[in-house]
Amino acid sequence: MVHSLFMKPLISLVTAALWLCVSQMSMAQSRLDNDPDVVLFESDKKMTLLVVKPTTVFATKKGGRKLGTYPEDTKLQLLGMTDKGYKVKGKAKHSMVTGWVSPKNLASTKPKFVEELKKHYEREMAIRELIANKEVAIGMTIGEVQKSIGEPTKKESRLTKEGRSGKWEFIKGKEQKHYTNTVDPRTGQVFRRFSHVTVEEQEKLTVEFENDVVTAISSLENNSPGNIRIIVPPIYFGY
């Protein structure tokens, strides 16, 4: 009985400790997901880098606390990146470590992989800016367009063995209230009475796409091509 009485508080303490640990890990991941400078890679994309020279792994993207050292020839899984560092996971001298490293001591078996990573990062930064400003650009995917300006007013698409193509229309309108003048038959006084509401088209944006990537943009308000942004299409890594 005494043993049982002591076990209940112990189990409660262990449970609370585990909950706190999981909660802290979730908060840390949430901060990483919301970091405007960090681009994360999907967990199902196993991109591997090789350590060509022993490299130190740090706790944050800016350095900070040292977590260990990856020996030469260690294979690392790429989890995320900034313009100056990579977030990786791999075995250090004594255990598995996840942290930030400098790209200069890493290599890939895929030609131009580092160059593609740089383009991917720059593209992601451009996409975030476009979505924040509710804008579209040639080179965006249809999914990115939806995140930026919402669902289209009209869809026209076709599906072939090469993929989906077509065009979407986005119509921006403004409600206009209409009134009529009415004369009171008893007093002869003229007053305004609400009649109806119409939606007047202010702008019509047409987005054409092939294989789910935007290829052309036109607007009724401004057809000047100089105002249309063009970004790099999505980068597909061959892993």
Image (tube, rainbow, N blue to C red):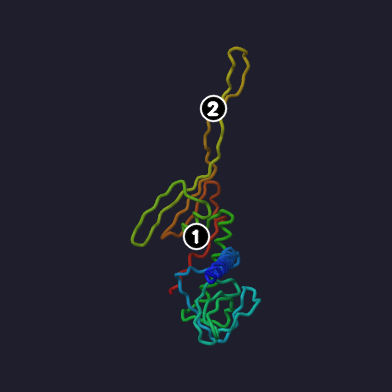
Q: What residue sits right under mark 1 in the picture? A: 140
Q: Is residue 159 left or right of residue 119?
A: left
- The residue sitting at 52% across, 41% down in the picture is 201
Q: Nearer the viewer, residue 156 or 51?
A: 51
| The C terminus: image quadrant | bottom left
- Residue, far top: 186
The amino acid at mark 1 is Met
Q: Nearer the viewer, residue 118 or 30?
A: 30
Q: What residue sits right under mark 2 in the picture? A: 195
Q: Position of residue 41 (x, y in %)?
A: 50, 69
Q: In the rendered structure, which disc, 2 or 1, sits on the residue that comes first in sequence?
A: 1
- The residue sitting at 58% across, 13% down in the picture is 185
- Picture quadrant where residue 102 is located: bottom right
Q: Position of residue 193 (x, y in %)?
A: 58, 24
Question: Please, what secondary structure does the residue beneath circle 1 have?
Answer: loop
Q: Position of residue 192 (x, y in %)?
A: 60, 24
Residue 106 makes an appearance in the image: yes
